[in-house]
Amino acid sequence: MKRIFPILLSFLLAAAFTSHAQNLDYPQRSWLKDNAYTIHTDETMSRASWEYIVPHITDKRIVLIGEFTHGAKEISGLRNDLVRFLHEQLGFNTILFESGTGELAVVDVNRKQLNATQMTLGFFGGWRTKENRELMEYVKAANISVAGFDVQRTGNSFKQLLKTNAGKYNMDTTFCSGLEDRYGIIQRELADKKAVYDSVRAKTVQLIADYQQAYSLLSGNKSGNFSREFLLTRRTITNRIRFLEYMLRFVKDKNWNSRWVARDSAMADNIRWLADSIYKNEKLVVVGHNYHIAKSNEHLTVMGEVLHTYYPTGMYSLGVFAGSGAYADNSGKETKMLPPDSIHTDLKHIIAQLKGFTNYLHIPEKNVNGTEWLHQYITVNDTFIDPGGSNKMILAKQFDGLLLLKKASPPDP
């Protein structure tokens, strides 16, 4: 009997913690009932009610749509649905993706000749899915412009675009093609965990210098009005240089924080450049990971935070999360989502309280009764929050609104 009592006590305490975490108090449940709007009633996501979001984005030029992982079918389907609504009802005509600038430039320039599968080749591997092929079919049919804002390369297609522009201005096309071939080799070497600074420094510095030479030649051989294709080519060269510089620093100092900040800073600069130089009069949809599109991050400066300083009233950031299921990680491996936190309030507890399959929440600026969980630390697993592996965030600081799905699953290939 003495041995049974401690076991029973432990069980009761664990049950109490679980019950406390899962059962939200009355003000929270009441606020959710009044402010959580159902977008899709069931997992078929066949009928959508996006009108609830309109009052919050009608005066915004930039809407940022996040995802807790790059590998979830329902997240991509939700995004596709919202993109259609934004285009057809609110006049958003350009989508900026977390993909390479040069690679998406090729897609945009040639989209009339490309099929949906070919258009997804501008994305990184994890986004070359059925759902993204469906989005590209819509992009082509609706004549929507696409561009990439990532400083990283996400394919090999830019080589031909660079060679074409070089040929127009009497540059050595073999030299320009060779730049991209060398970049691919050095990119892999810099990303190798065993990379040694002294062994990669000289060849990386030389490649940077050669890209700078190509940029100067392109700039010197052209005057007057620049075509979009030409401007995107030069911007991609700038991105190649910037990537090589911060990756070389990383090989030397192994500072993950600096590497993440450098990438997000470069992506923010790319979006600003695209918004102010290429798509001056367009309303933009930005698609990327929650980490990048967030308005702030407690640990590091992120892309959305930089953008928010330039467009403080002109952008709306939507964090997207799921409550259960599975997803594909960046290597394509299926990963089951963790169960809700049994002690602390978990975002999954909130999602479990909602009625619809997809629900939208606008986050109030002030902490009113029932919204404490939005303005305090809450457990959020199954996503990248910072290089330190954190699993808690203050949602009100990071996003303007939330899209919450009941369940996720790996994408269709």
Image: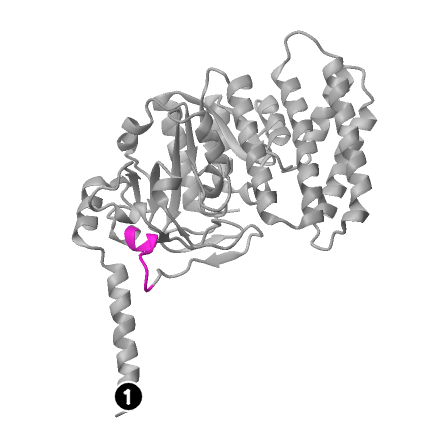
Measuring from the top left, give residue 153's x and y in whole percent. 65, 37
Give the amino acid at mark 1: Ile
Is 383 left or right of 23, judged from the image as shown? Answer: right
**Could you tell me which residue is drawn at 37 percent across and 61 percent down?**
339
Is 206 left or right of 188, judged from the image as shown? Answer: right
Q: Is 344 covered by the magenta stretch?
A: yes
**Frontmost residue, 226 versus 13:** 13
Q: Is residue 231 visible?
A: yes
**What segment carries the magenta color?**
342-350
**Could you tell me which residue is drawn at 30 percent across and 46 percent down?**
374
Measuring from the top left, give residue 308's x and y in whole percent. 44, 30
Element assignment for label 1? helix
Is 315 left or right of 53, judged from the image as shown? Answer: right
Above or below, comparing residue 158 to residue 338 in the picture: above
Residue identifier under label 1: 4
Measuring from the top left, give residue 186's x and y in whole percent. 75, 42
Q: Quadrant of residue 126?
A: top right
